[in-house]
Image (cartoon, grey):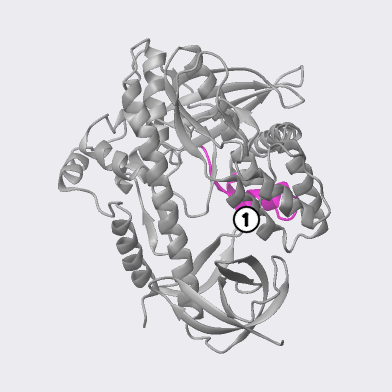
């Protein structure tokens, strides 16, 4: 019996090493880990006991590295207080420890079809520093008061002890919120949780609506996830956006803004996560013109959002491919050091200013850096990172995040090649996703696999429907080649 999972994991290890990422923890890090026997629950000074609040987590069905909990409280003026608890990873992973040095090298967990390579050992990230169900854990809490129109009226940060009362999953919560399924078991089991989640959903929708009014972009790309039966790869499944994912996404965006504002108010140098105004805007204008839409000559997020909403409504089948083209033209996000006293660098895609990464310290090193800055500010201490150190780390984290994304993308291609390698000669319906001097690319409608069209590409453009025949695959390199048929 083949072990596709093992084969893909081997490819992932090689890809990580080629990109300068470490797939294994050092002996020093493992020795340090062996000395950690329990979660940090020291009450200390100024740490509030909020274990009695109805905290819950919503994540992927199989996630155990839980970084955030949320809870809400409504007020008579129709405003709502949202609390976001973020796992206090720094309580066990101290700066410049062996575990921290590994995390600083990779800067992120790497999620591949061959398995996950965590930034921190699973004893920590899925247990002792995870906000696991039923456990008391230290956290940094972001408190925000949100008006009926989605405006954030006030925000503050503090440390607290929290307890996750229900570990929930995106898909089941989303189906219930949309009225497509009955209550998930944990929602039934925990008194008051149904009303709590509906309130959170309402507030998240307010936040989302306000951001999109201000030009946040409605983008939807296809990233298939490998599906296994035992060790055998059987399918690729596209993960869809849903109400529960949006709920967490919108709260995390708000919490990251509040964190950036807090650090600025304390005079702390800090990271910002930015997406610069696109240099290739003229090319975006040309893409919009194909559909008869006119965009301004200068970058305008609101105008681009109007175009995207119209295209999703007009052609939902091709919209993910348009989204991907726009994402590539906008460019990559990056980390920068911000020491400004007033205006903050902007995140073009989210239509927000003063944005950082703070809500996933088990999975991303920039969030752990930010957490240390927050804790120093709360304690009235000096910054644990010198400005020149933060400048280096911002560049380093951007570089390694890009390396990790390339590994993940390569493994998606390798999984696709592995799934199709027994189907050479079969024909498929496809859509053209790329057409340039560098080559023509197509995406199959089912399974959702992309490959290169090596013959018959003349006259094709992005969005055209074609029939193709699978000619060859290369699992190690993730290559899939098609020829056009039915000419």
Q: Is residue 372 left or right of residue 193?
A: left
| Quadrant in the picture for the C terminus | bottom right
* Of the pair 483 and 281, the residue shown nearer to us: 281
Where does label 1 land, which residue?
A: 324
- Segment colored magenta: 165-186
Measured as percent of width and height from the top left, residue 212 is found at 73, 36
Measured as percent of width and height from the top left, residue 366 is found at 41, 34
Relative to 432, is 282 above or below? above
Relative to 149, is 400 above or below? below
Measured as percent of width and height from the top left, residue 436 is found at 61, 65
Other residues around mark 1 within 10 Å, as few (<14) / some (14–19) / many (≥20) = some
Q: Quadrant of residue 200?
A: top right
Q: Is residue 437 visible?
A: yes
Looking at the image, the residue that sits furthest to the front is: 437
Is 185 within the magenta?
A: yes
What residue lies at 30% left-to-right and 46% top-to-bottom? 121
């Amino acid at each position: 019996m083949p072990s596709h999972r093992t084969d893909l994991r081997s490819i992932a290890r090689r890809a990580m090493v080629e990109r300068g990422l470490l797939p294994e923890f050092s002996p020093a890090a493992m020795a340090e880990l062996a000395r950690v026997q329990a979660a940090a629950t020291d009450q200390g000074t100024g740490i509030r006991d909020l274990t009695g609040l109805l905290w819950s987590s919503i994540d992927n069905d199989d996630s155990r590295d839980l970084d955030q909990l949320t809870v809400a409280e409504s007020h008579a003026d129709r405003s709502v207080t949202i609390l976001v608890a973020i796992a206090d990873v720094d309580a066990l992973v101290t700066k410049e420890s062996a575990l921290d040095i590994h995390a600083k090298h990779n800067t992120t967990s790497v999620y591949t079809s061959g398995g996950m390579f965590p930034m921190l050992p699973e004893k920590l990230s899925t247990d002792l520093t995870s906000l696991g169900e039923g456990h008391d854990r230290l956290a940094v809490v972001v408190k925000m008061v949100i008006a009926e129109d989605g405006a954030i009226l006030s925000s503050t940060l503090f440390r607290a002890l929290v307890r996750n009362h229900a570990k929930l999953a995106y898909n089941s919560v989303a189906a219930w919120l949309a009225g497509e399924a009955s209550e998930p078991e944990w929602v039934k089991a925990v008194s008051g949780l149904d009303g709590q989640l509906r309130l959170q959903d309402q507030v998240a929708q307010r936040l989302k609506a306000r951001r999109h009014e201000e030009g946040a972009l409605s983008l939807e790309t296809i990233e298939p996830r490998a599906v296994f039966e035992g060790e055998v790869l059987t399918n690729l499944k596209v993960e869809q956006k849903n109400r529960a994912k949006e709920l967490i996404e919108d709260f995390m965006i708000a919490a990251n803004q509040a964190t950036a504002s807090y650090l600025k108010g304390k005079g702390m140098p800090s990271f910002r996560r930015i997406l610069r105004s696109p240099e290739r805007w003229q090319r975006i204008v040309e893409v919009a013109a194909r559909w008869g839409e006119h965009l301004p000559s200068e970058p305008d997020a609101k105008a681009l959002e109007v175009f995207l909403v119209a295209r999703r409504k007009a052609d939902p089948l091709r919209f993910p491919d348009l989204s991907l083209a726009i994402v590539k033209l906008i460019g990559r996000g990056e980390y920068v050091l911000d020491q400004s006293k007033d205006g903050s660098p902007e995140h073009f895609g989210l239509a927000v200013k003063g944005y950082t990464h703070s809500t996933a310290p088990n999975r991303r090193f920039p969030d752990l850096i930010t957490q240390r800055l927050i804790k120093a500010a709360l304690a009235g201490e000096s910054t644990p990172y010198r400005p020149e150190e933060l400048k280096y780390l911002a560049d380093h984290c951007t570089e390694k995040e890009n390396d990790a994304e390339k590994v993940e993308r390569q493994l998606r291609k390798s999984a696709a090649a592995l799934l199709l390698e027994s189907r050479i000669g079969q024909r498929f319906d496809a859509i053209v996703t790329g057409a340039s001097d560098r080559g023509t690319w197509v995406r199959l409608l089912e399974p959702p696999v992309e490959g290169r069209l090596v013959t018959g590409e003349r006259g094709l453009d992005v969005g055209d429907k074609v029939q193709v025949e699978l000619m060859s695959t290369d699992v190690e390199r993730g290559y899939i080649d098609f020829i056009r048929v039915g000419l």
